Image: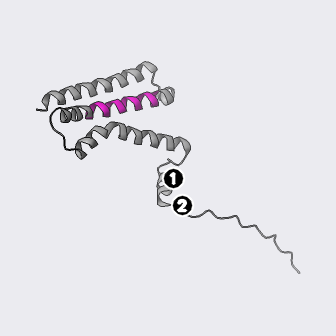
C-alpha cells in the first residue's frame, strides 16, 4: 500500500466581505490609521458645510440668512486649517514641512475664510 500524504486541515473561511469593506480595502483605508483619516475627512465635511446645509433646509431671511451665507466659507476654511494642523503635526517631518510652514498655511486658510465671509456678508443684500 503506497504511503498517503497527511490530510491538510481546512482553514475556516471568512465570510465574504461587503462591498463597503472591499471598497475600503481597495482605497487602502481599512487599516486603523486609514479609518482615522477617513473620519477626519468626514468630520471636516460636517464642520465645513453645516451652515450651508442649514441654509438649504431652513427658510430664513434677513440677518439670519446673511450669517449662514457668511459662515459657509469661514467654516470650510476653518476645517481646512484644522486638517492642515493635524496632518502637519503628524506627517510634517516626513513631508519636509516645518512647524512654521504648517502654522503659516493654517493661518492662510483662516484668513481666506474670514475674507470670504466678510465679502459675502457685505454682498448679501
Picture layout, residue 65 above or below residue 19: above
83 in the magenta segment: yes
Mark in the foreground, 2 or 1: 2
Q: How is the image coloured?
A: one colour
Q: Rate crowding at label 1 as few (under 14), some (14 to 19) or many (20 or more) other CA atoms within 10 Å.
A: few
Name the quadrant of the C terminus: top left
Q: Position of residue 97 (x, y in %)?
A: 45, 24
- Residue in the picture at 81% in, 71% down: 5
| Marked residue nearer the N-terminal end (2 or 1) | 2
**Quadrant housing residue 47:** top left
Tag 2–tag 1 contact (CB < 8 Å): yes
**Quadrant housing residue 67:** top left
Instruction: Tell me how far mark 2 sits from mark 1, CA to CA.
Output: 10 Å
Residue on which disc 1 sits = 25
- Residue in the picture at 76% in, 68% down: 8
The range drawn in magenta is 72-88
- Which residue appears farthest toward the bottom when viewing the image? 1
Residue 84 placement, left or right of 8: left
Q: Which mark is residue 17?
A: 2
Amino acid at each position: 500500500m503506497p504511503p498517503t500524504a497527511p490530510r491538510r486541515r481546512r482553514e475556516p473561511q471568512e465570510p465574504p466581505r461587503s462591498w463597503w469593506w472591499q471598497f475600503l480595502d481597495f482605497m487602502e483605508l481599512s487599516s486603523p490609521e486609514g479609518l482615522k483619516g477617513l473620519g477626519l475627512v468626514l468630520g471636516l465635511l460636517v464642520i465645513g458645510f453645516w451652515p450651508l446645509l442649514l441654509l438649504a433646509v431652513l427658510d430664513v431671511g434677513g440677518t439670519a440668512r446673511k450669517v449662514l451665507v457668511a459662515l459657509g466659507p469661514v467654516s470650510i476654511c476653518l476645517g481646512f486649517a484644522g486638517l492642515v494642523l493635524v496632518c502637519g503635526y503628524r506627517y510634517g517631518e516626513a513631508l519636509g514641512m516645518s512647524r512654521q510652514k504648517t502654522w503659516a498655511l493654517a493661518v492662510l486658510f483662516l484668513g481666506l475664510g474670514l475674507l470670504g465671509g466678510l465679502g459675502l456678508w457685505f454682498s448679501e443684500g
